[in-house]
Amino acid sequence: MRQLLIKYLIIAIITFVAVKLITTIIITIWPDLLIMQQDNGEIVTLGTAYLSRVIDYIFNIIIIFLLFKDMKREKVVNIPILILTFFFNVLGIIFFLLTISYNKLIIQKH
């Protein structure tokens, strides 16, 4: 359990830093990426949050695969936790760890 906690803590921190870093690098390389010109000549600028969120979703998919692998190993496959992880990776990780803790606690009581 402790190994899983450390593993997913490191993954969550790396994901947070990587999303910010990749977003900054992409905007630095392509500064016009989030600027669009409409048909009537207006220029629309999107915030970097759009790009950041897309990159975050990509990392969340990777975390989902890691969680699913660990869920199968612990025999606790829970699809709603995987769906939650897609939108909020930290909450998905917390609920995964709570589920494993709860199951181990029940096994110890019996």
Image (tube, rainbow, N blue to C red):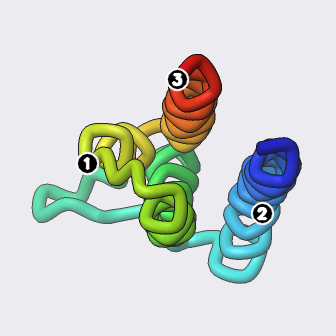
Q: Which of labels 1 and 2 is toward the front?
A: 1
* Rendered image quadrant of residue 15: bottom right
Toward the left, the furthest residue is 39
Name the residue: 44% across, 45% down.
85
Which comes sooner in the sequence, label 1 or label 2?
A: 2
Residue type for callout 1: Ile
User: What amino acid does circle 3 point to?
Assistant: His
Between the residue at mark 3 and the residue at mark 2, the CA separation in whole angstroms equals: 43 Å
Q: Disc 3 vs disc 1: Cβ atoms closer than 8 Å?
A: no
For mark 2, what is the residue?
A: 18
Task: Classify 10 Å Cα crowding around label 1: few (below 14), some (14-19), many (20 and above).
Answer: few
Determine whether, in the image, residue 39 is placed left or right of residue 16: left
Other residues around mark 3 within 10 Å, as few (<14) / some (14–19) / many (≥20): few
Q: Which residue is mark 1?
A: 79
Q: Is residue 93 above or below residue 52?
A: above
Label count reads 3
Q: Amino acid at mark 2?
A: Ala
Q: CA distance from mark 1 to mark 2?
A: 26 Å
- Residue 3: percent from left, percent from top: 85, 53
**Residue 51: percent from the left, percent from the top?**
51, 58
Residue positioned most to the top: 109
Q: Secondary structure at mark 2?
A: helix
- Which quarter of the rendered picture does the N terminus lie within? top right
Above-or-below relation of 93 to 8: above
Distance Cα–Cα, label 3 vs label 1: 26 Å
Q: Is residue 26 visible?
A: yes
